[in-house]
Image: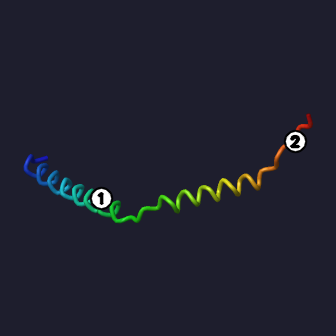
């Protein structure tokens, strides 16, 4: 392949990658924080699993 052609293709691909990275950074920074929602969700999942899991019989002492 001609070196100039190779360099032109490299520049085009590099520009595409830079644009994708910029779009990804913008998308990540635009997401609302979900800390409380996530913790509440996992707490409800844990509670549901505890309720659904049968408990072993209590040991008498």
Q: Residue furthest right?
A: 60
Q: Residues within 10 Å of mark 2 (few under 14, many from 20)?
A: few
Mark 2 vs mark 1: which is more N-terminal? 1
- How far apart in space, not on screen, are marks 2 and 1 (Cα)? 54 Å
For image coordinates 51% across by 60% down, the residue present is 36
From the image, tell me which residue sits under label 1. Answer: 25
Q: Is residue 56 left or right of residue 22?
A: right
> In x, y percent, where is residue 50?
73, 52
* Nearer to me, 22 or 52: 52
> In x, y percent, where is residue 9?
16, 54
For image coordinates 16% across by 51% down, the residue present is 10
Q: Is residue 22 left or right of residue 36?
A: left
Reply above or below: 3 against 16: above
For image coordinates 29% across by 63% down, the residue present is 26
Foreground disc of the pair 2, 1: 2
Q: Is residue 31 left or right of residue 50?
A: left
From the image, tell me which residue sits under label 2. Answer: 58
Q: Helix, strand, or loop for circle 2?
A: loop
> In x, y percent, where is residue 61?
91, 34
Q: Helix, strand, or loop for circle 1?
A: helix
């Amino acid at each position: 392949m001609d070196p100039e052609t190779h360099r032109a293709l490299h520049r085009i691909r590099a520009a595409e990658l830079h644009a994708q990275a910029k779009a990804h950074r913008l998308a990540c920074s635009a997401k609302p924080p979900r800390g409380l929602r996530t913790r509440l969700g996992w707490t409800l999942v844990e509670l549901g699993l505890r309720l659904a899991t049968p408990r072993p019989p209590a040991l008498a002492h």
